[in-house]
Image (tube, rainbow, N blue to C red):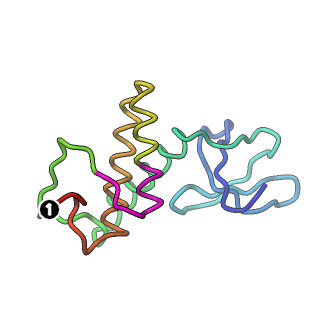
Amino acid sequence: MEPGTLYYDPATDKVGEYQDHLGKYAMLRPVGGGTEWSADPKNLRPATDKERMSAGVKAANHLTRNDPAKKPPLEPAIDLSAPPRPYPNCATCDELATLRRTAHKSGDYSAATDANVLLRRHHTQAHPQRPQDPTE
């Protein structure tokens, strides 16, 4: 088990980031930070793309609700009717766009929406000086 790898813990029904071993237990931390918990490493499995995406959206929503300084500005308004486009030469943008396409093709529109949320959040954090839509 490598530190930083995301695992699904069926005992808690949560995805956590592997930190280290403590005795016979694996120590996991919630995605986005928080209190670690111990888990039986025999029961853990790597998180699926859908579980990773869901945990990321949950962490982003928690951060936005609990830190007013991190709340996105109300202006300018973003056109939510069109999916966000990845910025050229950005690996994270490409990965999230690929997750969205895969989810959409499989009919998992909830996961596709989650990918859009994460991509817009990434745009805000990684490309703050650029327009929201890279085609503008």
| Rendered location of residue 96, percent (x, y) | 43, 50
| Rendered location of residue 83, percent (x, y) | 26, 44
Q: Is residue 107 above or below residue 88?
A: above
| Rendered location of residue 5, percent (x, y) | 67, 55
Question: What residue is rendered at 33% in x and 49% in y?
Answer: 117
The region drawn magenta spans 85-96
Q: Is residue 121 left or right of residue 72?
A: right
Q: Quadrant of residue 106?
A: top left
Q: Quadrant of residue 120?
A: bottom left
Question: What residue is rendered at 65% in x and 42% in y?
Answer: 8
Question: What residue is rendered at 77% in x and 54% in y?
Answer: 26
Q: Is residue 122 above or below residue 16?
A: below
| Rendered location of residue 40, percent (x, y) | 79, 45
Question: What residue is rendered at 46% in x and 42% in y?
Answer: 99
Residue tagged by mark 1? 74
- Residue 87 belongs to the span the image colors magenta: yes
Q: Is residue 71 above or below residue 15?
A: below
Task: Tell me the quarter of the image containing the N terminus.
Answer: bottom right
Q: Amino acid at mark 1?
A: Leu
Q: Is residue 123 left or right of residue 92?
A: left
Give the structural element (helix, strand or loop) at label 1.
loop
